Amino acid sequence: MSEPWRRLPALSLKQIQYFVTLAQLRSFTETANRLAISQPALSSALRQIESVLGGKLVNRTAQAVTLTEEGIAILPHAQRLLNAAHSAFDDMQQIMEQGGDGTLRIGLVPSVSTLLFPAVPQLLSEHFPNMRVEFHDLTNDALLVELENGSLDFGIGATDSTVPDSLTVYPLLEDPFVVVMRKDDLLAETHNLPWRQLAKRPIALFLKGNVSRLVASLIESHKLNLSINYRVDFQETLYGLVRSRLALAILPELYTATLNDDQLTVVHLQQPTLSRTVAMMRKPAPLRSAQTEQCFQFLLQAFLERIKKGNKEFQ
């Protein structure tokens, strides 16, 4: 690729187009009419091309217009240049119309993936076939940063006091907190468990983020005597600690949607009930393009309808 500052010949794409059209029609009159220019302007453009390239391209007589050997050799290069220019111009127009490169960038926290896949990609493919979609999985804190700096069009995550005022929140559902324990644990006999019954039991929790903050706030506000013995980064580590009888794991229910383990079970926590609000989030200003805005509104309604039906499949 040549350097962008390298000086180009003093030729315009229109002048190249004049030469290619003349080569095809072999008539100055027809070419001038086709291009809606005067014949003197066409002749002047052709002379300038020949001057810049340093040779004669066209033989003109009273009977016919023919190409010189040099003109014949140059013609395919000129056609390739025009085709590339037309293609690039079409791409640039499409980018302007779509407000970017035609890519929809959706951020999500991994625990909400069961709400999205495989239904959302299929829906977008059906209703917006020309839209390329990227999914970016992030921690909730990183999701908020990416939304605020404009790297993402919108995101699906959890809300708390850390959501900046610059973002608009569209609540989707409440995700209750549960405890994951072994099936042979004595506490596993109940479907709902008061928080205080976890006292003196070793607890495993995520090291940081929205989940950790919500649990810490509950413990403080209700003066619960809970022992957080393990703080980890990854969900599978939580489950490993539970399998090993080292701890009980506390986390929102959506995290357990794909849990398929013969040794483990999920019990809802109550007294008090704690949940996190899962929401779609975006900047309040219009999105990058009309199509991006349409995608957002379409998915928002699809989510709300699905949740209203009890988390059934998208229709």
Image: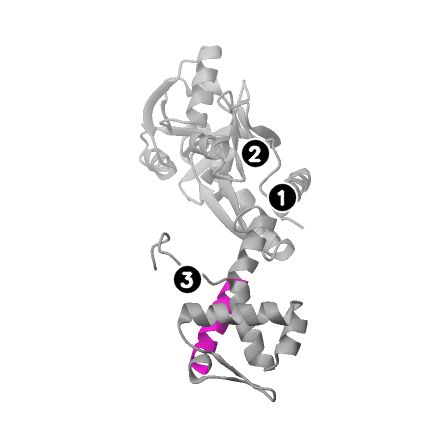
- Front-most of residues 280 and 180: 280
Label 1 Cα neighbours within 10 Å, binned few <14 / some 14-19 / many ≥20? some
The residue stretch that appears in magenta: 72-86
Secondary structure beneath disc 1?
helix
- Amino acid at dot 1: Leu
Residue at label 2? 282
* Residue 25 position in % (x across, y down): 60, 80
* Residue 67 position in % (x across, y down): 50, 83
- Front-most of residues 242 and 157: 157
Does residue 155 appear anywhere in the picture? yes
Residue at label 3? 9
Q: Earlier in the sequence, mark 3 or mark 1?
A: 3
Secondary structure beneath disc 2?
strand
Secondary structure beneath disc 3?
loop
**Residue 38 as seen in the image, left or right of residue 204:** right
Relative height, residue 249 to residue 49 (above, below)? above
Q: Nearer the viewer, mark 3 or mark 2?
A: 3
- Front-most of residues 234 and 285: 285
Relative height, residue 189 to residue 197 (above, below)? below
* Residue 143 position in % (x across, y down): 46, 34
- Amino acid at dot 3: Pro
| C-alpha distance separating marks 3 and 1 | 50 Å
Residue at label 1? 299
Does residue 190 appear anywhere in the picture? no
For image coordinates 65% across by 42% down, the residue present is 306
For image coordinates 35% across by 55% down, the residue present is 6
Q: Earlier in the sequence, mark 2 or mark 1?
A: 2
**Residue 263 as seen in the image, left or right of residue 106:** left
* Quadrant of the snapshot with the N terminus: bottom left
* Residue 187 position in % (x across, y down): 45, 27
